Image (cartoon, rainbow, N blue to C red):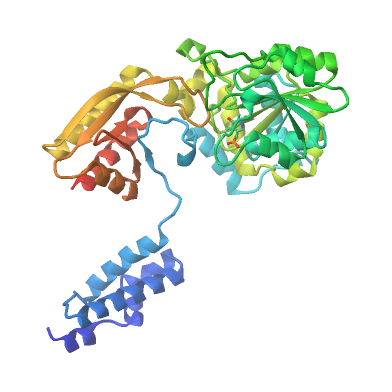
Amino acid sequence: MKQQELLRRLPSVDEVLKSPRGAGWLDAHPKRYVLQAVREVIAFKRMEILAGGTPDVSPDAVATDVELRIERLTAKRLRPVINATGVVIHTNLGRAPLPPDVLRNVVEVARGYSNLEYDLDSGTRGERYDHVRWILREITGAEDALVVNNNAAAVLLCLSTLARGREVVVSRGELIEIGGAFRIPDVMLQSGAVLREVGTTNKTNLGDYEGAVDRERTALLLKIHQSNYRVIGFTEDVPIGELVGLGRREGVPVMFDLGSGCLTDLRPYGIHDEPLVHDVVGAGVDIVTFSGDKLLGGPQAGIIVGRKDLTDRIAAHPLARAVRVDKLTLAALESTLLCHADPEKAKEKIPVLRTLLQGEEAIRRRAKRIMLLLKRSLGDAEVSVEQDESQAGGGALPGVSLPTYVVTLKVRGVSARHIEQSLRRGPVGVIARIKSGRVVFDARTIRDSEVKPLVQAVREAAG
Ligand SMILES: *Cc1c(COP(=O)(O)O)cnc(C)c1O
């Protein structure tokens, strides 16, 4: 066909919009993206023609291209991915997946109005924290509880309220960075508290704390859980009970930033160094802070539990308003905590716990299934199942190795880098890693329902 003829046949924006398939686009998508897509497709075809090409300019072909383009333009930027890294609490991948019951509750509450700050008994203004206060008190044994946006905010708020302009005593072995620029000395500065470091990197004893405490100057004794690292070898730190004893003698409150905030006893599973919130509260710590989306397995949140006279002051601080949680978080947190009320069921219901504690045999079976499906769909690829170790991640259980099974893949003529990248960028979004020139999929964090989409994605990425 002649160039002139093709150009003449190329439909106008109006014609495309009025075509039979075009009618639905404006109903389903924002007008600006529909128009943009139509204009771009026509302009692209025109360019092709002028360059000597012969693109299909039939109404159907144009409509198909426009639909693809609209899909691209309106695709969600934030979307689900398959976590094949084996890192259970992966901050970059959204930390804790939520249980179906919890999601249902979020939808129920968020769909319409709720009693977020309304007391249904008295018909007067209520408190948003009341919805989770009772269950947090029950589960942790604390006198009172408060919830803010995340644990970083919880720590900042507690320090700002309890220690502005006064000293906070911290061991040099606990001056941590969590990642994302959350460093204890910086948070301290931001809160207006004065950091009083004691001890050394590897050893801090009670005498170090005693030497630094002063009834006038000291606002808090602060202990911070070594969430994402371990100091091993010639080490010493002060058990929380002894710190509480010192605090009592000197009339100084003790605060413990637990980070992960474990509600489930993991000792039967060989995981020993994650303190239970209940035990820490029971040891007499005055204020305890922890995350909602680490080992607790719920929504992003910062939970503060402890002495009521202190939590009352914390709740009244102006910063509390700035870091307050919304109804979606509260709805998710309340139902996650309800799952924790029965520790045995929690291990089944809460994805973080289930993924962490699942038996090796179940992981091995899933890995084998993935291997078989990959072999079947990839023909002559080298696929095998190997033993490996997964990580808990998210500032929990450093140094704890979780035995797992991984599927490793090598496809002749296609580099591992290419497959890994195509998987990441593809429509499903599979996050895998590379080890010794092979793509590695850790079966621990892959859900059974994700096996088929994963295999399909690999087939496309390796093709
Ligand atoms: C993870 C962590 C934090 C920060 O908690 P977020 O919920 O991520 O804000 C603070 N302190 C410790 C010890 C942590 O492990």
Determine whether 27 is above or below 103 in the image: below
Q: Quadrant holding ligand 1? A: top right
Position of 372 compared to 367: left or right? left
Which of the 4 quarters of the picture holds residue 191?
A: top right
Q: Foreground: 217 or 397?
A: 217
Position of 456 compared to 117: left or right? left
Residue 30 rendering spot, x and y as whole percentages? 46, 67
Position of 311 compared to 257: left or right? right
Check the image and name the residue furthest to the right: 216
Q: Foreground: 223 or 85?
A: 223
The N terminus lies in quadrant: bottom left
Residue 41 rendering spot, x and y as whole percentages? 30, 73
Residue 42 seen anywhere in this rendered image of the structure: yes
Which of the 4 quarters of the picture holds residue 440?
A: top left
Determine whether 246 is above or below 187 in the image: above
Residue at 82%, 37% in the rendered image: 165
Residue 365 rendering spot, x and y as whole percentages? 27, 23
Residue at 30%, 77% in the rendered image: 42
Residue 284 seen anywhere in this rendered image of the structure: no
Determine whether 147 is above or below 427 in the image: above
Determine whether 136 is above or below 156 in the image: above
Position of 435 compared to 97: left or right? left
How many numbered discs, if any? 0
